[in-house]
Amino acid sequence: MTERDDLAPEDAFALVGDETRARIIRVLNEERDGKGAPPVLSFSELYDRFDEVGSSQFNYHLQKLVGHFVERTEDGYRVRPEGMALYRTLRGGTFRRLESTAPIDVGLNCYCCGAAVTATYEDGVLTVQCPDCDHLYLTSTRIPSRSVDDEEALLSRLDQFDRHKLLAFNRGVCPTCAHAIESRFVPAAEAPFPHTEERDLYLHRSCERCGNVDYVSVGKSLLEHPAVVSFLREHGTDPRERFQWEFEFAMTDRFTTVRSRDPWTVAIELTRDGETLELIVDEEGSVRERTRSTG
């Protein structure tokens, strides 16, 4: 088996800057066809796909990939996990210019000013925001979508994708590289996007390995918490079947109280049908106490 070599990120991208090398990775991935383990192709089987390239030139480019994106075995060559990740990124359209939509009415009046909240999908980024007061409800990382004809389906997919990332962050894992993340509370004024008086603070999560960052309200960070899900279900609402922005406690800090700042202790209350659920969150965003009361 090929011994893996470590590369600086810029060197790794430079390796696949050549058209022949990028095509080798594509061919090895497409031979797998998304099923089972990556197949091994002999040199001749692989080279047969490159009739227009000289044998020595092809071998030069192939060997440049070996140890980084391609693995050499006794029987031939197969794509490495790094090569599969690169192929998925390229095939998914991450580096292409994508479709955009006109503003989409999400069926919600802004919790801050009452205006109709809209969603826009611009070059792969979904933003749900009030056009009048700029209160931000959701913004995604760049997510390629091949079809924006069905606006409801687009919103549903990207909402669920955002929840997937949220769940990983909540469990202390970076959704990009699986490294451990660090969490801390920061005042809303320190967040790198517009905020309104309905935002007091954010839970900031960051990954030192890949640089991934997340700013989330206390309420949104708890939207998938078992105690919250159970409480809402008991009162007739399944949060997993509705958009995130339909829950005011997740989109504003009206139900959040800062108990202390050194260390941080934050309380949030949800009330339904005369019953209240209170959660106490520590400085790392973890629930330390929970109580339910009536009246």
Image (spheres, rainbow, N blue to C red):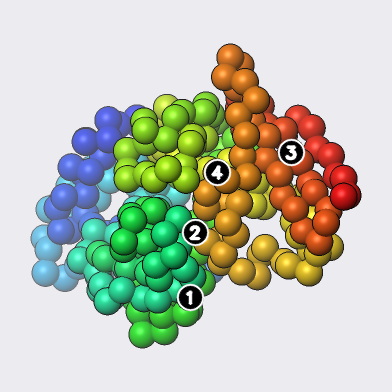
- Cα distance in 3D space between marks 3 and 1: 29 Å
Q: Report the residue at 30% width, 31% height from top.
A: 7
SS state under label 1: strand
Q: Which residue is mark 2?
A: 111
- Residue type indicated by callout 1: Gly
Instruction: Name the outermost residue toward the top.
Output: 262
Q: Which residue is mark 1?
A: 107
| Residue named by callout 4 | 253
Nearest the viewer among 6 and 246 is 246
Q: CA distance from mark 1 to mark 2?
A: 12 Å
Residue to which mark 3 is pinned: 279
Near-viewer residue (245 or 148): 245
Classify 51 as above or below 284: below
Disc 3 versus disc 2: nearer the observer:
2
* Chain-order first, disc 3 or disc 1: 1
Outermost residue, right direction?
A: 294
Alpha carbon distance from label 3 to label 4 = 14 Å
Secondary structure, mark 4, is: loop
Nearer to the camera, 168 or 250: 250
How far apart, in angstroms, are the residues tagged by discs 3 and 2?
22 Å
x and y percent of residue 165 in the render?
Answer: 52, 50
* In the image: residue 183, left or right of residue 268: left
